[in-house]
Amino acid sequence: MSIEDDVALLERVPTLRLLGTTALRMLAIGSEQRDIVRGDLLFNAGDEADAGFIVQRGAFRIDDGSGAEIVAGPGALIGELALVVAMQRPSTALAIEHSSVIRIARSLFQRVLESDPVAARRLRDEFASRTSQIASDILMAGAKLSI
């Protein structure tokens, strides 16, 4: 894929779209592509998380060990929080078909945010909005359970 193709793919990811074209171009140039064979792990629960992955082609089964599984296909961002904070992977990602991903290292992502404070503020505001919504949802669920 060309840099332009990678930028177009990154623009499809709602969280990354907030950064703008210049930041996405920097991410596309600094990231790496990985091919994953069907049945291979992208990562395991408990692994140190130092990057996020955008699915270019194929699909991954994401299993958090609780029985809840999701399938992430083209355009999905896997490991979003690993882009901004050091952590361990909370789930396992297994390729369910021959797949390729764009790996964005946290160090690259942070350099891009440092070079573009406006994009960093947009991302911060999005995370704050999501956090507020989650807190609201928890309060509503708690109220319904106590009835």
Image (cartoon, grey):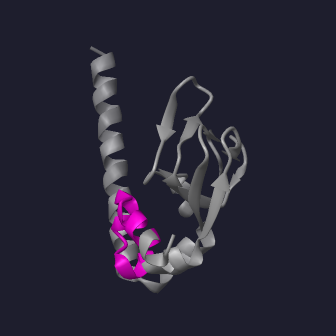
Spot the residue most to the bottom: 115
Q: Is residue 95 magenta?
A: no
Q: Is 55 or 144 nearer to us in this picture?
A: 55
Of all residues shown, which one is farthest toward the top?
147
Question: Do we see residue 86 in this rendering?
Answer: no
Depth check: give the residue in front, 2 or 146: 2
- Where the C terminus falls, by quadrant? top left
> Which residue sits at x=70%, y=43%?
41
User: Magenta segment, principal secondary structure?
Assistant: helix
Q: State whether residue 72 appears in this view.
A: yes
Q: Residue at x 52, y 26 (%)?
A: 68
Q: Position of residue 29 (x, y in %)?
A: 54, 79
Quarter occupied by residue 49: bottom right
- The residue lying at 33 percent from left, 68 percent from top is 18
Q: How many marks?
A: 0
Query: Magenta stretch containing residue 19, yes or no?
Result: yes
Q: Please, is residue 147 above or below residue 10 in the view?
A: above
Magenta residues, as a range?
6-24
Judge from the rendering whether residue 91 lies leftward or rightward of residue 68; answer left or right: right
Q: Where's residue 30, x and y in %?
A: 58, 77
Instruction: Answer with the quarter of the image where residue 35 lies.
Output: bottom right
> Considering depth in this image, is 6 or 145 the residue closer to the camera?
6
Residue depicted at 55% across the width and 62% down the height: 83
